[in-house]
């Protein structure tokens, strides 16, 4: 049966049904997206997908609501929102539609669920408070999407629907960007592992271009690698390796004597012809050639391991 209607509730909107709409409109681009609380419209039928409304969760009947009591729970008993339910049921098909390689779909599906979907579920159900984000709470994705709602005194009868349809492509851009980045990390994995094997016991990892590498380093347990070099446009870059995504602390810093220097001053301080720049925080340096950046890398390793 062809899906002809995607139905969610009317009125104010939240991130969960907005993001669910991103997934469903990608999979069923010819279906009409309706926002309604009319009981006749919400009557289940094979050509409808009903979500964040309907008073039930029944995947076979294509109803994906979570407001009923008891609400649907994950295996670990954390609550689903409509987004989590839609992602669990349609997420793999969505990834295939986004041209994610079949070999990467399961991994990206679970990773996106944990990093992107679950926080939406928890916030929507009140299982966590927005305040956990501290002063950044106003900048979380649900808050930013919520800021696109119409103002309270907008007199237009279609204000909520207009705002929803304005927010939808914005929400789509966040989902698609996250999926593209996860797919890119999966593509980079084999390239980085190959580079790690080539590096052997060296503390310097040379990559063919800038790419995500830290997760591959951790999986390979290549703790001996302290710096990464790669071409960067017409120049070459030398970078430190952060201990985690939650800190700026690195396995090793670039030499203190290079900090904040450029061009001739950096060449003099480093003794390397072609040295061009070193960030004052000592996590990045740039040189004009591969030979120059590798020379700087060797100096950095020597100083870091003394």
Image: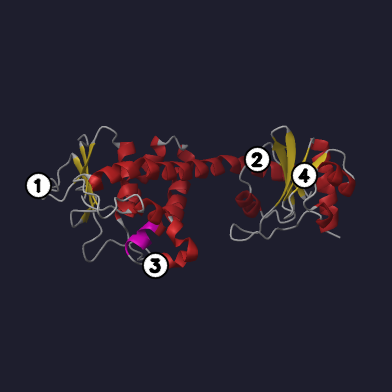
Residue under the point 41% across and 64% down: 130
Q: Which residues are magenta?
A: 120-125
Q: Which residue is mark 2?
A: 210
Q: Is residue 114 left or right of residue 292?
A: left
For the point 39% across and 35% down, the residue is 97
**x, y (%) of residue 183?**
51, 41
Q: Which residue is mark 4?
A: 277
Query: Does the segment drawn in magenta span residue 192?
Result: no
Q: Which residue is found at the position 86% from the left and 42% from the top?
A: 264
Marks counted in the figure total 4
- Between the C-alphas of marks 2 and 4, the distance is 17 Å
| Between discs 3 and 2, the one toward the N terminus | 3
Q: Nearer the viewer, mark 3 or mark 2?
A: 3
Give how far across and how far down residue 75 sits, in percent.
Answer: 36, 62
Provide the residue designation for mark 1. 40
Q: Estimate the spatial distance between the alpha carbons at disc 3 and disc 1, rounded to whole Å.
A: 35 Å
Q: Which residue is mark 3?
A: 129
Which secondary structure type mostly characterizes the magenta part of the structure? helix
Q: Nearer the viewer, mark 4 or mark 1?
A: 4
Helix, strand or loop for disc 1: loop
Secondary-structure class at tag 2: loop
- Disc 3 versus disc 2: distance between alpha carbons? 37 Å
């Amino acid at each position: 049966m062809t899906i002809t209607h995607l139905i969610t509730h009317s009125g104010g909107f939240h991130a969960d049904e907005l993001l669910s709409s991103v997934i469903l409109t990608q999979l069923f681009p010819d279906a009409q997206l309706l926002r309604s609380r009319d009981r006749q419209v919400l009557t289940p039928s094979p050509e409808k997908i009903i979500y964040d409304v309907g008073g039930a969760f029944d995947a076979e009947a294509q109803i994906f609501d979570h407001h009923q009591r008891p609400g649907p729970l994950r295996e670990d008993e954390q609550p689903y929102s409509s987004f989590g339910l839609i992602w669990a049921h349609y997420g793999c098909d969505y990834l295939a539609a986004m041209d994610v390689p079949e070999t990467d779909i399961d991994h990206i599906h679970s990773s996106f669920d944990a990093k992107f979907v679950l926080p939406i579920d928890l916030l929507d159900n009140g299982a966590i408070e927005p305040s956990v984000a501290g002063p950044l709470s106003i900048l979380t994705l649900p808050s930013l999407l919520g800021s696109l709602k119409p103002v309270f005194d907008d007199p237009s009868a279609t204000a909520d629907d207009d705002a929803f349809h304005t927010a939808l492509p914005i929400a789509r851009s966040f989902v698609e960007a996250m999926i593209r980045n996860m797919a890119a990390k999966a593509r980079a994995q084999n390239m980085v592992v190959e580079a790690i094997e080539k590096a052997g016991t060296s503390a310097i990892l040379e990559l063919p271009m800038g790419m995500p590498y830290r997760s591959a380093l951790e999986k390979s347990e290549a703790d001996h690698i302290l710096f990464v070099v790669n071409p960067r446009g017409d120049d070459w870059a030398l970078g430190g390796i952060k201990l985690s995504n939650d800190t700026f602390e690195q396995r090793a810093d670039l030499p203190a004597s290079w900090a904040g220097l450029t061009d001739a001053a950096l060449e003099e301080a480093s003794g390397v012809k072609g040295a061009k720049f070193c960030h004052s925080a000592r996590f990045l340096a740039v040189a004009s050639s591969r030979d120059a950046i590798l020379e700087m890398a060797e100096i950095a390793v020597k100083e870091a391991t003394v």
